[in-house]
């Protein structure tokens, strides 16, 4: 039987649709293009209407996926390039003006879920410096934790803090789930559709998007886990026996080097977001100002 494989990545969802529909079928309501920027592959999937949304199981909007595998294959001299590519993708989705609130979602104590909090640690916040740095865009940030440790839904504390700050846009950083193991801790997806915290592991919470928060919400996500049944289905060409499907439910696989990768990605994303919000800064500038 064919197992419905789980993924948070629009690029993978489109690929899955094509595999199931056949090469001769066209996916209406969806546009896709791929290009190379500074040695990194960037795939843009735009879901144009309801038909496309239903086909891929994703909200209408733009999804940009940056493949960071060249950076992890050869870190020498590629950090700045990787940060610039991610920053440019984020710039394409952000409002050009106004204060921005960055929400680091996830559980700092659980490494595969720590992308959000670690990103905030490497972010340049400037809201409190408006008097001395008037040319900098006001940026505030927080990483409050998860429902089990705060008693607050992510949407609740993000909405409250963003509203109190008067933010005109929110950037939500979170961990995602992928279909293909090789994408884990090696891909960044940016989208103007917001996100649903916990959806990657089947723990759906209240959505963070323009409708719930009242301002544009840009999501920045990194897949750090793959559902065990999805991984098995991918390895077997989609022909997953029912007993393996049942055993794989609720189990998630993460890379062996997840600790080092997540720490590296937190630094990279924090730098890239700073560069997108403060276009005059280089990666070296952003790192120096945060340290």
Image (cartoon, grey):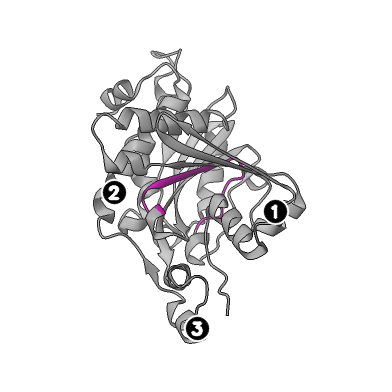
Mark nearer the viewer, 3 or 2: 3
Q: Classify residue 123 as left or right of residue 151.
A: left
> Picture coordinates of residue 226 (x, y %)?
42, 63
Q: Earlier in the sequence, mark 1 or mark 2?
A: 1
Q: Is residue 123 visible in the rendered structure shown here?
A: no
Gap between marks 3 and 2 measured at Cα: 33 Å
Where's the N terminus, which quadrant? bottom right
Camera-side residue: 96 or 72?
A: 72
Residue at screen point 58% across, 46% down:
194
> Picture coordinates of residue 53 (x, y %)?
70, 53
> Picture coordinates of residue 118 (x, y %)?
33, 44
Q: Main secondary structure of the magenta part?
A: loop
**Disc 3 crowd, CA 10 A, few/some/many (<14, 14-19, 20+):** some
Q: Classify residue 196 as left or right of residue 150.
A: right
Camera-side residue: 118 or 53?
A: 53
Boundaries of the magenta span:
183-197
Residue 125, placed above or below residue 73: above
Say if the magenta span includes residue 258. no
Gap between marks 1 and 2 measured at Cα: 32 Å
Q: Earlier in the sequence, mark 3 or mark 2?
A: 3
Q: Which mark is residue 241?
A: 3
Q: Residue furthest front?
A: 24
From the image, tell me which residue sits under label 2. Answer: 261
Asked which quadrant contains residue 193, the reply is top right
From the image, tell me which residue sits under label 1. Answer: 53
């Amino acid at each position: 039987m064919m197992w419905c494989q789980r993924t948070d990545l629009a690029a993978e969802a489109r690929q899955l649709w094509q595999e199931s529909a056949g090469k001769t079928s066209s996916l209406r309501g969806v546009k896709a293009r791929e290009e190379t920027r500074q040695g990194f592959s960037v795939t843009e999937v735009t879901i144009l209407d309801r038909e496309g949304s239903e086909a891929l199981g994703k909200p209408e909007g733009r999804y940009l996926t940056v493949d960071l595998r060249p950076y992890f294959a050869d870190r020498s001299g590629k950090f700045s390039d990787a940060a610039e590519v991610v920053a440019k993708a984020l710039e394409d989705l952000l409002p050009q003006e106004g204060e921005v609130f960055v929400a680091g979602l996830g559980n700092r104590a659980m490494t595969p879920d720590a992308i959000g909090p670690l990103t905030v640690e490497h972010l340049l916040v400037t809201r409190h410096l408006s008097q001395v740095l008037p040319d900098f865009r006001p940026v505030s940030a927080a990483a409050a934790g998860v429902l089990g440790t705060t008693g607050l839904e992510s949407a609740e504390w993000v909405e409250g803090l963003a509203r109190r700050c008067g933010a005109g846009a929110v950037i939500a950083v979170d961990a995602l789930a992928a279909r293909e193991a090789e994408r884990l801790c090696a891909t960044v997806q940016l989208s103007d559709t917001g996100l649903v915290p916990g959806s990657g592991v089947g723990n759906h919470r209240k959505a963070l998007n323009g409708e719930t928060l009242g301002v544009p919400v840009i999501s920045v996500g990194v897949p750090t886990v793959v559902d065990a049944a999805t991984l098995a289905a991918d390895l077997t060409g989609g022909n997953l026996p029912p007993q393996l499907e049942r055993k794989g439910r609720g189990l998630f696989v993460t890379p062996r080097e997840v600790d080092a990768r997540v720490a590296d990605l937190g630094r990279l994303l924090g730098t890239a977001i700073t560069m997108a919000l403060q276009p005059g800064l280089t990666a070296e500038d952003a790192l120096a100002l945060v340290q």
